Image (cartoon, rainbow, N blue to C red):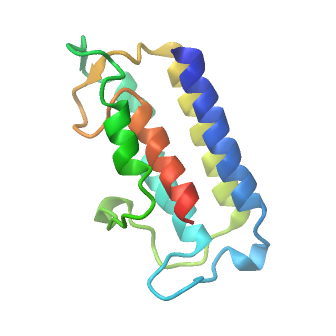
Amino acid sequence: MKSAIQNTILETYTKLNDLLSSFEKEEINIVPFEGSWTAGQTVQHIILACSGLTILFAGNTEKTTRKPDENVKALDGIFLDFNTKYQSPENIKPAEIDYEKGSLLASIKKIQNDLFEAAETYDLTLTCLDAKVFTNGFILQLYTRRDIHTS
């Protein structure tokens, strides 16, 4: 299971890195259409949502009383439904500022490395008690994959 999750982390963050790298410096902060976020804001949203999540692996946990991947299909149905639009929670809503491509790339690389190491170090079959939405490491990757697709 660890290697599958690590592969997903690498695949997801490589796609995000490649997508962001494909933008010219000037394009990062252009709003593509009214009511949408810039590429910089979308990546910053992912950074806000994913930074520090590895702390949860070391936090309060308990043995999972269900099959650890039992909710993956339901979560796929929610987070990979690209036709449904959601509003961002305020705490992970990106500021309306100009973003610097290099800083964004460095931040997503750090998150990738941190998650990869956490997947190697911690027992991902445990239930995290410190955050209600965190489920077995998968929700983070689904959320990131959704944001990559909708950007």
* On screen, residue 84 above or below 81: below
Q: Position of residue 18 (x, y in %)?
A: 75, 53
Q: Is residue 142 left or right of residue 3?
A: left
Is residue 58 left or right of 17 when viewed as pictured?
left
Estimate the x, y position of residue 102 in percent, counting from the top left.
Answer: 73, 60
Q: How many marks?
A: 0
Residue at 66% across, 34% down: 10
Say whether residue 51 is visible: no
User: Residue reaching furthest bottom?
Assistant: 34
| Residue drawn at 77 percent across, 59 percent down | 21
Measured from the top left, where is residue 66 in percent x and y? Answer: 23, 16
Q: Residue at x 32, y 60 (%)?
A: 91
Quick check: 60 left or right of 24? left
When the figure is inspected, residue 19 is found, relative to residue 118, above or below; the finding is: below
From this view, report whether residue 129 is shown above or below residue 109.
above
Residue shown at 30% from the left, 62% from the top: 89
Residue 129 quadrant: top left
Q: Nearer the viewer, residue 133 or 53?
A: 133
Q: Quadrant of the C terminus?
A: bottom right
- The picture quadrant where one finds residue 126 is top left
Residue 100 percent location from the top left of the image: 68, 68
